[in-house]
Image: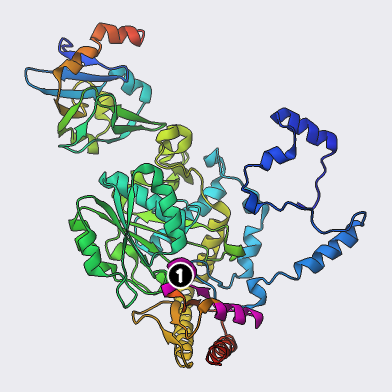
Amino acid sequence: MPYTYHTDDDRKAMLAALGLKSEEELIDVIPDKFRLRQLLPLEKGRTEPETLRAMGLLSRANRPAGHLVSFLGGGVYDHTVPSVVKNLTGRPEFATAYTPYQPEASQGTLQVIFEFQTHISRLTRLPVANASMYDGATALAEACLMAAKITKRDVVLVPQALNPRYLRVVKSYVAGQGIEIRAVSPSPAGDLDLAALRRALSDKVAAAVVQTPNYFGVLERPWEFEKDVHAAGALVVASVDPVSLSLLKPPGEYGADIAVGECQPLGNEMSYGGPLVGFMACKQEYIRQMPGRIVSATRDVDGRDAFVLTLQTREQHIRREKATSNICTNQGLLATRATIYVSLLGEHGFTELGRVCHERARKLAGMIAACDGYALAYSAPFFREFVVSCPADAGAIVEAARRDGVLAGIPLERYFGPGARQRLLVAVTEKHQDEDFEKLCAVLKRAALVKVG
Amino acid sequence: MDFKNVRFTKEHEWVRSGDGDEVTIGITDFASGELGDIVYVELPKVGAEVTAMQSMGTIEAVKTVADLYAPVSGVVAAVNGALEQSPDLVNKDPFGDGWFVRVKMKNRRELDALMDRAAYQNMIGK
């Protein structure tokens, strides 16, 4: 918002209408630790151009990932966003459209959503997909609630190697619904400990969640335990990276009942970690327990192709507190970007994307493992992200690397405690060049020497 | 249909009792008429415990979804499987082929709290 035009009188009138005394009262619910209790350090009485220049200089202290060499991942990835994606989604028909409350009047919007669902259905090999979710974390949380509703059970098994941010969202979501989350430990190789998973199954378990690749980048083998989960009367919920589905077996082919994930890697910017866009697909038989909205193709009275919103009778505006979920909208613009991105790449391009990411990741992993003191933490196969075991505190290495203009990855201690102090999560995409790899290895080697010295 | 052994709830379910503890449950013609074309019904599982005046399933029509309330407490003894393929039976024959579930009652006395036909018709203004 570059210009606010309200006069003092306007503000007074608005506050009076709200029954408030000051603007402060509007925002006093924000915890104090997040509040900036001072004015911005700007000189008074400056002109607009002078102020803009001062702010511009100030903003140069920012170090956006795009200006650095970034190996950050952990659920949000730095893929190339083709210009056509930005251009098309910048069109006002897409950029300014709000969720369609008279949906059938917005045939263009519905067509895009229908195509998004089609892409997700094809990628996951599950017959139905919804119009998108807020992000991968809430999509997983909704899948857990859905499984509990379907099975009428109240325990959900999640892997300890689940994205820790997802875990926090899932816990917040299910806290009020009497659903218990139980963690299943990983094997030394970094994937799920199948014996531990089997021991955890019981007639109380609604779902076993599998995330593949998991937070450590490691690939799981859900087909090895899918039958056990189903035999126990529970559902298999797969949280998957859509880019990995370019190469890996899709959830629908290993018996997953619900698949969810994050579409940020498909044509969306990292944007400081959000907004994101989630997806959900499931088996046909669970369509009525699926949250959110679904667009269907049909024919109108004149026999023309048309799109309609279906199953919205279970949404919040009709079912109120009994709605399937309180998600009653979708992440339209970002889902549009994902749709355009996947359409643009096509089947061949998408497979190529996955292959390049994987090959680049393997190359970097080999280079890092050849650096003195560094090794791969896990032996199980990975896709485009892996954990490095470092000779020193990974947080300190990341700090040192940042000074050299390299975002080396995510130090895992912050999520997994002191045992993970020397663990660093490194993500690779098709954007990385050999020189980026060399730069990272040089930084890592220097950091190891500092430690020895 | 003979309504002598039929009781009604304010949520528009009917309950038909016989000599034993089992009752048959459905929704009234008034309710199915108000809902419009019913496209899907979600029923409890056989063996499930249900509690009087709590939701035990849902009835989905074109424009809305309504809850199916248990008129009495007990255990589900049978469900009308025909509704899975033909939910429109609820519109066509609400007191007959459009029945929902049979419940083995825990306490016959709960029936006493329900309305007879005259009281129900009075409630809906017919």
Stretch of the chain drawn in magenta: A396-419
Instruction: Decide whether residue A319 is among the magenta residues.
Output: no
Q: Position of residue B102 (x, y in %)?
A: 15, 28
- Which residue is denoted by mark 1 in the rendering? A243
**Residue displayed at 53% across by 52% down:** A331
Q: Position of residue B114 (x, y in %)?
A: 24, 14
Q: Residues within 10 Å of mark 1 (few under 14, many from 20)?
A: many
Above or below: residue A102 compared with residue A440: above
Three-letter code for the amino acid on which mark 1 is drawn: Val
Q: Position of residue A264 (x, y in %)?
A: 52, 63
**Residue displayed at 29% across by 54% down:** A207
Colour pattern: rainbow
Q: Quadrant of the C terminus of chain A?
A: bottom right
Above or below: residue A64 compared with residue A157: below
Residue A32 visible in the snapshot: yes
Above or below: residue A185 compared with residue B117: below
Task: State how many labels appear.
Answer: 1
Report which quarter residue A181 is drawn in: bottom left
Q: Position of residue B94 (x, y in %)?
A: 24, 22
* Left or right of residue A453: residue A314: left
